[in-house]
Amino acid sequence: MRRLLTGNGAAAWGARLAEVDYIPAFPITPQTEIIERLAEWVDRGELNGRLVTLDSEHSMITAAGAAAATGARVFTATSSQGLLYGMEMLYTVSGWRAPFVLANVSRGLASPLTLEPDHNDVLAARDSGFIQLHAATCQEVLDLTLLAYRIAEDRRVRLPVLVNLDGFYLSFTREPVELPEPEQVRRVLPPFEPSTLRFRASAPVSQAVAVLGGGPYSYFRYEMHLAATQALVAFQQAAEDFAQVFGRSYASVERYRCDDAQYAFVMMGSFATKAKEAVDRLRDEGEAVGLVRPRMVRPWPEEELRAALSGMRGVAVIDQNLSTGKGGVLHSELCSALYGQPDAPPVLTSFIGGLGGRDIDAAELFEILRVTKRAVETGERPPPRLLYTEHELKEMRKLQAIAAVEHPAEEEATP
Amino acid sequence: MKTASRILGTALFLDGFEVQDAPRYGAERRGAPIFAYVRADSREIHERGIIDRPDLVVVADDSLCQVPAAGVRLGLSAQTVVLIRSREDAATWRERLRVPGPMLVLPASSTDDDGGESLLGAECVGAAARLLGVVTRDSLKAATGQELERLPEEVRARNVRAALRVFDGHADHAGIVTGQPTLPLAAQEPPRWIDLQVESADVAAPTIHAGGTSVQVRTGLWRTMRPVVDHERCHRCHWMCALPCPDNALLVDDAGYPRVDLDHCKGCMICVAQCPFHVIHAVPEHEAQTAERAEAGDA
Amino acid sequence: MRPEGQRDDKPIRKLKQLPARHIMASGTPMCAGCGGLEAINEAYDVLGENTIFVNAAGCMTLLSIYPYTPFRGSWLYTAMAAAPAGAQGVRDALDVLAAKGKLDRDEDLEVVVLTGDGSAYGMGLSATSGALERDLDFLYICYDNEGYGNTGHQYSGATPHAARTATSRGEHGFGGYKKDLFSIWAAHRPAYVATALAAEPLDLAKKVQKAKQLKGPRLILALSPCPTGWDFEPRDALEMGRLAVETGVWPLKEYVDGVVTHTKVPKTRLPVERYLGRQGRFRHLFEPERDTGQLDEIQARVDAYWDAIER
């Protein structure tokens, strides 16, 4: 059945169709609609599970991990400050090898406080041990949520999975979504089989115990890393099963019009569909350009990215995040995947934009391509570009004037 | 031992050396074995962490030699001097530990010359300083005072006296620690790295799949005093002594008599304090062990 | 959801009824003479093996260090602020799985939070209050050694007035006052709140048994004399607990159905200095000269507490 759903609605439907047992919750904009929906379904008996609102995201993620460690299928959701408030527990519960799915509705981080999206929140969780999937459409939010359970519960992986959707651009935006039948979903997603990692009176276990010394610690952490790399295989297999049942296929890296492309945009999340639109228009004008979008950010699909970009002349990386004092995280990650590889594109330009919900419009994408082509032609490497226009600064100055900000430059000008 | 290592570190520092000293903490608590190390050199020290080829090993309590985690034998070479504070002699220890180099014993007694409780930290550091041969008496004295600054004057003075007494008593062995040449690169074994394989989370999660595995930890080695139950006078009111034992180390036999689990009793002596009939006695561990050996010999 | 069979144990009336052998295994790395470990030993005997301890960072975290555990049942370490939330997740998961027929009733577990005072009085309070307002069916055991013991005994929200700790070494010791966690819990109107300690094993066992038979949030707040942090000889750990009761410093009481009952009222209370004088952390109240002002204040506070009870 095809119907209009917001990204939040699609995430909630993902949890419902996964027939989750347990939903620890905590409200935060722009995620709240997810738990409101789920709460309603639980109250009406349409979802046979329990939803409990905790006192914080820290507690919520603890409860999620603890329930998964007990053998329940668990869904939870948060955003931004909430994700960071729970950060200690992200690292902790992944170390338990507790498999569950967390939807993060990404939103810029304070300070200054904002409600609008960018990817600094989700990338702060990059090294937490969670598998990370990034959705670009509402349909993907639903599908990736279902696939996330397959990956998380895979015996080779057994790690929690974070499914990211952009605040506002997905969370509050309705799009047509193909809603699968529960019967179909059961064919690709069997019930959770927790094996020996669960709590039962007849089989006592001590989970999440401390270690002494770097040797045991390294073993457990290395094994987590190796398990995470297995998520690439698990994702691929789950996606194949999924494609057979639903006819929609997903790869860890999406390539759009890349076949004969000399140039590519690399982006994550919902703004990538804007880049698709730009690619179409540029193609109409004869530009050999495509889009490469990692759906999976952890594990980092290096081989797939290398293959996708191999032989290209220039790549423009557009980061909706900012590692202060360094630049774009995606750019750094991509450089590390490509450095020294034969056929790696010689030019990787870096653009930072879309912070705190700032738009990236088509004109900017065209210009990004021009700058990248010029770098290839001249051999000069432009420094990372922070997308900010003359007009924006002018508007900012007006706000500063109201805020009674005095500009030292003007003071100096006054005799 | 942390303080002893700091006294030695400070003494060497006062004598113009570059110094590193550090304790190594485990998860275990007061009473549990601990070790600390000191490095000294005439030039800046770049090496860090545990010393893998020590020039001098000082064992403050010979019971540590039974604790694998204490690693007393770790990295011993023909140049390593081993000093053990013990009631047994050097020959016994040389054989028991298969010490390849010089082996010395610092005679252990429970009281010092002043008649007070023995200050084993101060004694060990006094000996170590003398064996190194490069620490002056004045620096040892100053360092001991400095590191024990927080203690009452009279305790500090006793420690200084103990350190200096042992320092003076080891004149014969002054400078026995010579240091050893660094290993040539070719002699350094390469690490045997492996390609770790992914294992199922059932194997590779930090999970213990059984109960009560801690019995394999011999906390009895912490003990310096041992409770000995006089069964002839025991009234078998085990709820008075066994119940409050924090380590569950007083086992009640079928006849209702408490028996000390020597593998696990840490020697807190709560049972001694609790017994309403005063039939549990605190006996120094070394005396108890000597008696045991004598008994075994008789039999 | 828990099977009723676990709840109808024979009532404990006499010390002799307590088991001669604890179910907790030996070999833990706790300090010799640990008053907290004593209390947990005694409580665990009553709770039995079908228990999962959900732990927050503190001394007892080190009970389970890979691959060693003294517990015969289960264990989950969470983080310092999160143990009640961990208990929520486990309890809810067991309930939901049972309701869905995925868990046999005899596979169920009693969920017990085990933390020190650092977590119980401070960092974990938000998670605790949340569990209380949601009427979570769990038992909370706090071993209260009146400081951040695991890190070397700095003062916590449970440190008594004037105590010297690693962060209150000054002339007058800790300037603050011990938080009243019992009342904080009671204000939430939970199923059960009790103070206890290992030195009164019968009182402790009865309270744990009573707590086990109730449903909802339950607290056993066990004062845990700490030889290392309080600076006394390990052999005196029980004596120290007894003195805490006999001086009235640690009232033994319980809260049920809105009513607080004292389970042991000392007939004639010993002066508080009998308790304080035995501990190095209060030595500065006696040496080099007697700090009459502080001692009187501490005595007055204890007297005021009991006056209010006895009135």
Image (cartoon, grey):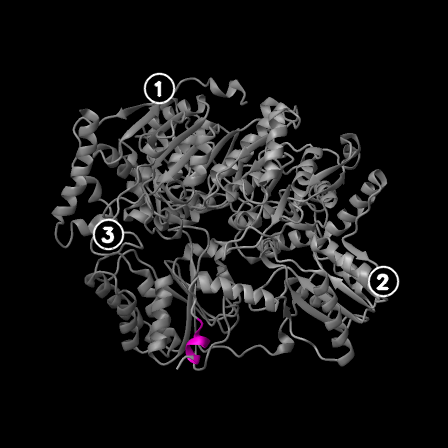
Q: Earlier in the sequence, mark 1 or mark 3?
A: 1
Q: Are marks 1 and 3 on the same chain?
A: yes
Quadrant including the N terminus of chain B: bottom left
Instruction: Say which quarter of the image contains residue B159.
Output: bottom left
Distance of mark 3 from mark 2, alpha carbons? 79 Å
* Residue identified by numbered label 2: A284
Question: Where does the magenta region start and end?
Answer: A407-413
A307 left or right of B258 in image? right
- Residue C288: where, in percent of width, then height? 14, 55
Distance of mark 1 from mark 3, alpha carbons? 41 Å
- Number of disc labels: 3
Q: Amino acid at mark 2?
A: Asp
Q: Residue at x 31, y 65 (%)?
A: B122
Q: Pick whichever, C254 or A266, lies toward us.
A: A266
Task: Tell us which disc is closer to us: 3 or 2.
Answer: 2
Based on the picture, tell me whether residue A178 belongs to the magenta stretch.
Answer: no
* Residue identified by numbered label 3: C173
Assess whether mark 2 and mark 3 are in contact (beta carbons under 8 angstroms).
no
* Residue identified by numbered label 1: C13
